[in-house]
Every structure is written in C-alpha cells, then in structure tokens.
Amino acid sequence: MNKLPAAVGLILLTATGSALASGYRIPEQSVNSTARAGSYVAYTPGADAAYYNPANMSWLEDRAYLEADATWIHLNSVAYADSRSSSLNGSSEAENFFMPTFFAVSPDYNNFRVGFSVTAPAGLSKRWQDPYPRTFAEEFSLKVFEFNPTLSYKFSDRLAVGAGVRAIYVDGKVKSNGIIDHYGSTAIRDMDGDALEAGYNLAVTARPTEDMNISVTYRSEVDLGIEGHADLNTNVLSGRYSGDTGVEIPLPAILAVAVSYTLFDQLTVELEYDQTYWSDYAYLDFTYPAPFANPVFAAAFDDAKAKHWSDTNAWRLSVTYDLKNDFILMAGFAIDENPVPEATLGFELPDSDALLYSAGVRYKVNKDMELGVAYLYDDKESRSVNNGTVKGTIDEAGAHLLTFGLTYAF
C-alpha cells in the first residue's frame, strides 16, 4: 500500500455522495443498471450478472459472455448560500469523469458458472475554490476499483446460488486551505494515499415459475485501512508536518431483495429494495506516528470527527420491453435516501435525498453481439443545514450518467 492521507477518509465520504447514490456509493456499473436506475438484481440477462447477482449466471444461455461498458459522469456545480453572510457563499466546480467497467461469464460446467467483473462501486470528487468552502474541502477526489471473481451453482431449474471475493483498491487525494478562526490562523493540507482490501458477496435466486425471479444479494462491508502521506502547514508557531498518516473508512455492506415478473414473454417488471449499512461509519479519525504539539494541527487534523451516519433505504422500479425486432427498451425510477445527518454534514459531502430517472435501449446486431446505450439523471433535493460549519442552503446538486456498452457471446 502506498500513501493515503487523512484526506482520503474525507474523500471517501464525500466524493460520491454528491454524485450518484447514498453516501459515496455508485450502483450503476453497466448499460442495463444505468437504464434501470440500479433496479437490476432479480432479472439480469447479461454478463453483468457476474457482478449484480452471480446466482443468475446459472440462467444465462450455455455460452460464454463478455461485456465492456463506459460511463460518462457529469456532476453539477453545487451552490451554497450561507445564512450569515453572502461573503461565505460558494459554488463547487462542475466535474466530468469517465468510468470503464468489464464483465465476463463462462459457459456451464456441470451446473457451475464462473464470472468476473471489474467495476468502480464508489468514488468521484468534490472541489471548492471559494474561500469559505475551500477551508474545508478544496479538493476531495477518490477512485475505488473492485475486482470480483464469482461462482454460481444451479441446484435445479428453480434454485441457484452464487458467491464471490471482493478485491478493493482505493486511491485518493485531499486538499484544504483557509483561515480557521478570527485570529487569522491558517490550516493547509495536501494528502494522498491508497489501500488494498478484501471482502465477499453472496447471492441466491429462486424461480417459483419460469416467469418469476426472487433474488437476495449481499455485499460485505470492507474496511478501507488507508495509509499514505500528509503535508500540513499553519502560520501558528510556524507549524509544518510532512510524514505518514492513516485512516479507516468503511465501504458499507449492502443487502438487496428483488422480485421480477415477465408478462407475455415481452414485458419484465422488477421491484427492488436495498439497504446500505452506513451506520458503521461513526467517526473519521486520522492517525499519525505521534500526537501533534501544535494546537492548530491537533484541532484541524488529528481530533476524531463525529460522523454518525445512518443506514439508508432505496426503492427501485424498472421495466424492460422486448420489441421482438432486435430492440429492447428499458426504463427505471428510484427513491434514494442519504446517510448524512444535519449535525455532521460538510462541504466534502453535501449530500441529500434523491430521485433517479433513467432510460435506455439495447440493439441486437446479430445472434452474438449486442450494443446498448443508457441515460440516468440523479436529482438531489435542496437541503437547509445549521450545524456550525454549514449554516445555509445546499442546492443544485445532481448528476448525469451516459453509458455505452458492447456484449459479445460465443
């Protein structure tokens, strides 16, 4: 493991929250999942079943599948209007990211199927240049990659199970720069680092009839023990620190329960409920080789910061319609809670509840190849906050996703 700053912790907390889902989670990793607003657990007809529900690899046609997807993500500029003084107002930078993903499923081997996926289940970024927000979050950028080999076994035409190993790599960077009190004391930090950790995932699907799937999936929590390097500066006592730092942040467990039903061999409806266990994130506590004697460093960078996030619920609904002429239409809607209580919300993660709207289409080029495109809009609610650091309104947050994908079977 390399370097990773105290910042990473904040990063993780922040980056995705203002992007796509509760906290820093990114549910949408493929054309199908983007088009269906993440409602993609019970009915997973592509190679991306290797990630979303490995048990469902058992229901795919007995062929090998490969899928490559690319998602463009645009984060809106977030507006902050302070209730104390307009001089404290600010707007975060609008940002654009490119996220590639990959999925593979083997043919059937005596009722066993092997899968593999490379995804980015969390991350993104938040940057502020206005003086007051920059004091807390000049830059918070995070990249999280998951490498997930999976295995499924079909007990019968009515029951299949799946499991996998999660290998998680995290890379992050954090900066902040500002005046932290009425005496003109400055606190500046520049941190970066990474971590490599592991977890697991489980899945089961029951098929009471050929037209119905009932699925449960579980992705374990992965504690990200990030280690890295920090450069800290202050004008108080000419303070300066350059050295090691560390922080532990959870990539939370996720439980999903979903049911799908296909009508007339054309229309498939899926309803999904998922819970993300953010309550494991109670404190953000950076560690250093020794306590700081400088009071600014101790208060700004060393003292544990309460977070006390809450578990979140999401309800997702999707429809898939096969036109029987090589085109398949998809659409989705989701209601997504945010985990951050008012008391601990900060500029690094100005999160709020969201409504998600999505649509997409797949086109069968021939019996082996399929192309797809999907769009999703994440509409974040305006949020008024009064907690000491943030006293005002967070508005205009949101995200746009555009995903392209290619699937090949042989």
Image (spheres, helix red, strand yellow):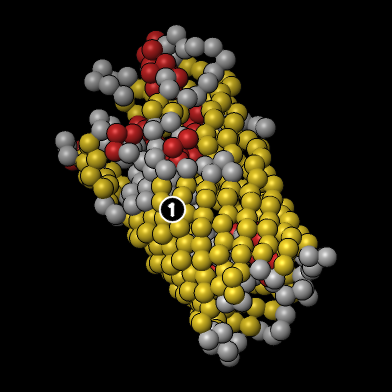
Which residue sits at x=26%, y=48%? 383
Q: Nearer the viewer, residue 94 or 9?
A: 9
Which residue extends farthest right?
A: 110
In the image, farthest residue toward the left = 84
Q: Where's residue 358, x and y in %?
A: 43, 69
Task: Confirm whether residue 16 shows in the render.
Answer: no
- Answer above or below: position of 313 versus 42: above
For the image, the number of numbered tags is 1
Q: Is residue 267 placed above or below 336 in the rendered structure?
A: below
Q: Position of residue 29 (x, y in %)?
A: 56, 60
Q: Is residue 255 left or right of residue 237?
A: right
> Residue 32's x, y, as percent?
55, 69
- In front: 296, or 403? 403
* As drawn, 271 above or below 61: above
Q: Do we see residue 239 in this rendering?
A: yes
Graded by Cα atoms within 10 Å as few (under 14), some (14 to 19) or many (20 or more), the crowding at tag 1 reads: many
Q: Which residue is mark 1?
A: 21
The residue drawn where x is 66% and y is 55% is 118
In the picture as drawn, the residue positioned furthest to the front comes out as 208
Q: Nearer the viewer, residue 23 or 322?
A: 322
Q: Is residue 181 left or right of residue 140?
A: left
Above/below status of 280 relative to 370:
above
Residue 203: x %, y % from top left: 63, 55
Amino acid under disc 1: Ala
Query: For the point 63% across and 49% down, which residue is it?
Result: 201
Q: Is residue 284 left or right of residue 203?
A: left
Residue at image position (69%, 85%) is 366
Which quarter of the image is occupied by the N terminus?
top right
Q: Could you tell me which secondary element the residue under label 1 belongs to?
A: loop
Locate the C terminus and report the quarter of the image it occupies.
bottom right
Q: Name which quarter of the figure residue 327 lies in.
A: bottom right
